[in-house]
Amino acid sequence: MKSLIEFDHLICADLAQSSGREWLETNGIGGFASSSLMDLNTRRYHGLLTAATKPPVGRFVLLSKVEDALVIDGVRYELSANQYKGAIHPHGHQYLDSFRIDPFPIFCYRVEEIEIEKSVFQVHGENTVVIRYELFGGLGGRRCSLEIRPLIAFRDYHSTTHANDAINRHVEIAPNLATVKPYHDLPSLHLAHNADSIDSSGFWFYNFEYERERERGLDCAEDLYSPFVLHFDLAVGRSPQIVASTLNRDVVETSQLEERELERRKNVVSSAPKGDDFAQLLTAAAHQFIVARGDRNSVIAGYPWFGDWGRDTMISLPGLTLVTGRFEEARNILRAFAQSIDRGMLPNRFPDAGEVPEYNTVDATLWMFHAVFELLRYTHDYDFVKRELYTSLADIIEWHERGTRYGIGVDIDGLLHAGVPGMQLTWMDAKIGDWVVTPREGKPVEIQALWYNALRVMEHLAIEFGDRDQSARYGALADFARTRFLQVFWNEADGCLYDVLGESGPDRSIRPNQIFAVSLPYALLPRDQALRVVDVCEWELLTPYGLRTLSPRDPNYRGHYGGDQRSRDSAYHQGTVWPWLLGPFLKAYVKVHGESAEARTRAAKFLEPMRAHLWQAGLGQISEVFDGDPPHHPGGCIAQAWSVAEVLRTYIEDAKGQMPASPGT
């Protein structure tokens, strides 16, 4: 894959522009590397090796960064950059001539007539990062060396570390290998290298400041320990190399590791349409979220701070695995979550430390039926569904009929009730202490759409599997739910659907949740009402980067997502834009306009701002959220699974019209 993302010196040397763009490398087991374009860490989550010690969770920042410097005839040129309180030091970005992702991050520095490129890539399937340097240009008889000083953190990736006396300063030195184990309860870090010499004098670097964390009102100061410095004589060897890993790697493997990664990444994008840069970038981005969980697969909801979440996984599955042709990963994801079903519920998330999963979601479980249906659209693998999923899916329906946790159960009117005071069970799940910001206890509109679709999917599967009695039962439940839905959810005054039916009456808030009553395969609404819902969502909620979570005309609307955690959480679903909602919106838009060529062309135009966004925040990725107010600054995670998945899916299926036939509709 050719380099599709590249920046010149004007961007690289501009502190504001280069520090605001971030690159991401992942390893397929939950670990990652990330920093800013100028290689200045602006987050506590930035680092060269964040290892997943209990894949895909249990993540610890082991190697935070390396301080690198060129020494030419005794003159020292620092290539790195750090932020301290009120100061940037050193100013290595001034030497950064260009940056590109090709297919992993490559930094090109120019000092006098000498060019030196640094590449960084993670090795798939293990906690290993490779850092390679390549010298270009003649030395003209000058003495030239490279000094590399690793800075280690060895702490949970949600926290920061500070100078302490508990650290084990010992460096175990062997030929072309240095090993450190600063704390007994964390893994050793092996740094294989081809340096000419090593100085094992270690000391602390104090008071790094992480600007993005300061903006978020979180702990933003850190001390890092340097256990040694490596010296490379560039007159002798022009390719300094370091392999930092929890495994004992050999530095001679670097070329082989790189070739393997290049081939793997080439294969990843091979499913994308040839010559379509947008699709290729999104396909590459999509693969970064798919991780191993034992012998199964799961999905990291977002980098740099989310783990694998049930809701995000099921919503993302079609875009991450089906559109990209990764069908076995799709099956493995469904297997993994089916094994975790409890009392008819999918886990909301697997905690970072690997504890018991949390079952506090109503929609994740229902999204699984949609994911299964989409798998069948692409693969027609009914044997797999019958053999490994059908019994679990039927059990889910039974649990929802008789009632499960948190008031989740079918009411006498055939609609699905969910919620108890103090809990947030839908995707609008922000909670500050005991304050549920968007309480949606009762009958949320998207839950009814998902419940209806789940029943229709089960009706279809029962027919396919010759289970006619169950098919009739599922069909009757679906008919009853739809009849009641049409009676009670239509808001004629606003020409759209109520958001929630609660004990105090219907909630008239104009929110995007109603779009699922149109976008899901088994639509609930007649065409005239479906068209009005799409129109209201377009007029009230659509922005260049997705749908707002609340109409700007609502007194509770918050147009800016930022500040400390309370400020952010209070705005999270009160106007903040979510790009993943472009997927269901464009699906609904194309559907109500007859899937015409004109509708698909307009859908493609709706996605144009996302092309530019791939160069703006998380490079080659799509952010979690954007401000509701123009100019719609990105926020949250720099790389969000369902953002990428739904933009890719809707681009291929709805804009380009490359969609397999739907079974049973």
Image: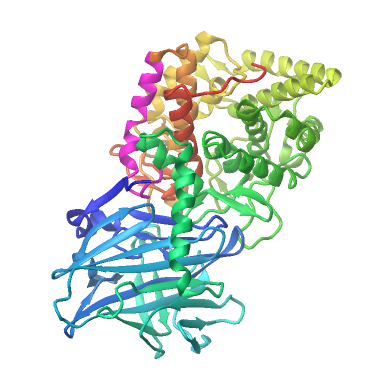
Residue 473, picture quadrant: top right
Inspect the magenta stretch and tell me whether residue 609 lies in it: yes
Left or right: 503 with respect to 593?
A: right
Q: Nearer the viewer, residue 577 or 202?
A: 202
Give the vertical position of 1 relative to 368 (above or below): below
Left or right: 522 with respect to 535?
A: right
Q: Which residues are magenta?
A: 598-622
**Residue at the spot 68% in from the left edge and 13% down from the top edge:** 483
Quadrant where the C terminus is found in the figure: top right
Q: Position of residue 278 (x, y in %)?
A: 37, 36
Whether residue 89 can be seen here: no
Whether residue 63 can be seen here: yes
Left or right: 276 with respect to 448?
A: left
Q: Position of residue 225 (x, y in %)?
A: 42, 81
Residue 375, picture quadrant: top right
Inspect the magenta stretch and tell me whether residue 550 lies in it: no
Q: Nearer the viewer, residue 55 or 155?
A: 55
Give the vertical position of 519 relative to 186 (above or below): above
**Residue at the spot 51% in from the left edge and 77% down from the top edge:** 190
Q: Position of residue 174 (x, y in %)?
A: 49, 87
Give the vertical position of 65 relative to 422 (above or below): below
Total numbered badges shown on the rendered structure: 0
Magenta stretch prevailing secondary structure: helix
**Residue at the spot 68% in from the left edge and 46% down from the top edge:** 347
